Amino acid sequence: MKTIKIPYYTSNVDLNIDEKNLEAILSPKMHGYMADKSEEEIVRNALANPIESDTLANISKGKKRVVLVTSDHTRAVPSKITLPILLDEIRKGTPNADITILIATGLHRATTEAEQRRMFGDAIVDYEKIVVHDAFKEEDMRRIGMLPSGAEFVVNHLAVDCDLLVTEGFIEPHFFAGFSGGRKSILPGICSQETVNENHSYKAINNDKAAAGITNGNPIHEDMVYAARKVNVQFTFNVALDNKKKIIAAFAGDLVKAHEKGCGFIKDLSQVPSVTGDIVITSNGGYPLDQNLYQSPKAVATAEVCAGEDGVIIMCSSCIDGFGGTHFEQLMLSGSIYEITEKLSRIPPKDTIPEMWCAQIFTRIMMKHKIILVTTYLNHELIRKANMIPASTLDQALAMAYHIKGKDARVVVIPDGVAVLAIKQ
């Protein structure tokens, strides 16, 4: 018997599995990557050596109104380390600038003050100007024009009215944008609900290029880059993280070139050959990404690559924050897999329902694979209504999966499904 720790909320849960069933454990090389500098040194070194850009301090000279876009409570950006350093760099160039930290929530709920203190530290919350983006607040939006897809580009006015726009985030594989980070700070980060919805339409999500690890030809990525360029992001900063959410690399400078460099680094460390299993077990890497069901298809999409025909996927996700979105919950509970898919497929891009993209990806996967959801927080009856199978423990889930696939089923384990880029051989 082998015991494997699977990330779950702020800790782990144990998977106990007979070694004769264990086909493979897939983990990214980044989880064993040893940086040769401290986290702070990595950040400062990246800022001192920006990619195809002047330094942030020099770019800041003469700027009076600065907006620094950062991530919300659903992302593991180590802002306690990065934000103070970024703010210092800006103030080196423009000591008296009016600086606003704009939290990019996309369509997520507002980040609470308690979450801000956990993410940024008390000093930043107490002494800096912080604005939480609200995609539903029309009076805060500015209409800019059209995106390459034909969607209307509407963005938070703060990004337009400032003299300097800077973004920070972190890069990992993303299940339909190719990679996170960089341009995503703007779209979906600080755009209106209409712009986010259309960028994430059924048609866009259904595109073959809208997948993890792919940016070339990806219509979602192309809209995002266009949006970030249109509002003139003059400097971007992104980090790469290990499985303990520690900084192992940082990339600063030009919006596109610095992000591309980071994506290449992540791709090299996250890419693994896929291994086919009758049962695939994964997680969202624990907190913060596993706090709701809305974020969970990220890892499930990775598991899908490794699941054999009619393979069972076991997803460990605390869902301590429930479904994670009212529209998403309503869609997931609105009927059978086929009824939901049929409904979504008929919705034109301009009428996209908020959060429907995650329901679309879940139902696409559930057309072929049963999903067993391991959670101790989300009501099990609701999970059943969402066309999934609930389980309270991993041992219970694995027993259910063996009952479906047989006691000799081959099991592939992907402890952190968000960090892995599984490549079909």
Image (spheres, rainbow, N blue to C red):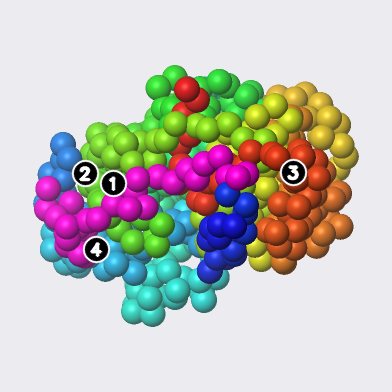
Residue highlighted by disc 2? 253
- Single out the mark in the foreground, 1 or 4: 4
Q: Secondary structure at mark 1?
A: strand
Residue 6 lies, in percent from the top left, at: 55, 58
Residue highlighted by disc 4? 39
Q: Secondary structure at mark 2?
A: strand
Magenta stretch: includes residue 132: no
Q: From the viewer's perspective, tell me whether residue 359 is left or right of residue 72.
A: right
Q: From the viewer's perspective, tell me whether residue 294 is left or right of residue 383.
A: left
Q: Which residues are magenta?
A: 20-49
Q: Amino acid at mark 4?
A: Glu
13 or 379, which lies in front?
13
Q: Amino acid at mark 1?
A: Thr
Residue 236 is marked as: 1
Residue 407 is marked as: 3
- Measure the alpha-carbon separation of dots 1 and 3: 50 Å
Q: Are marks 1 and 3 in contact (CB under 8 Å)?
A: no
Please name the residue shown 37% across and 52% down the image. Answer: 31
Q: Are marks 2 and 1 in contact (CB under 8 Å)?
A: yes
- Single out the mark in the foreground, 4 or 3: 3
Q: Secondary structure at mark 4?
A: helix
Can I make out residue 115 in this image? yes
Residue 196 lies, in percent from the top left, at: 57, 39
Mark positioned earlier in the residue sequence (1 or 3): 1
Q: From the viewer's perspective, tell me whether residue 260 is left or right of residue 47.
A: right
Q: Residues within 10 Å of mark 1 (few under 14, many from 20)?
A: many
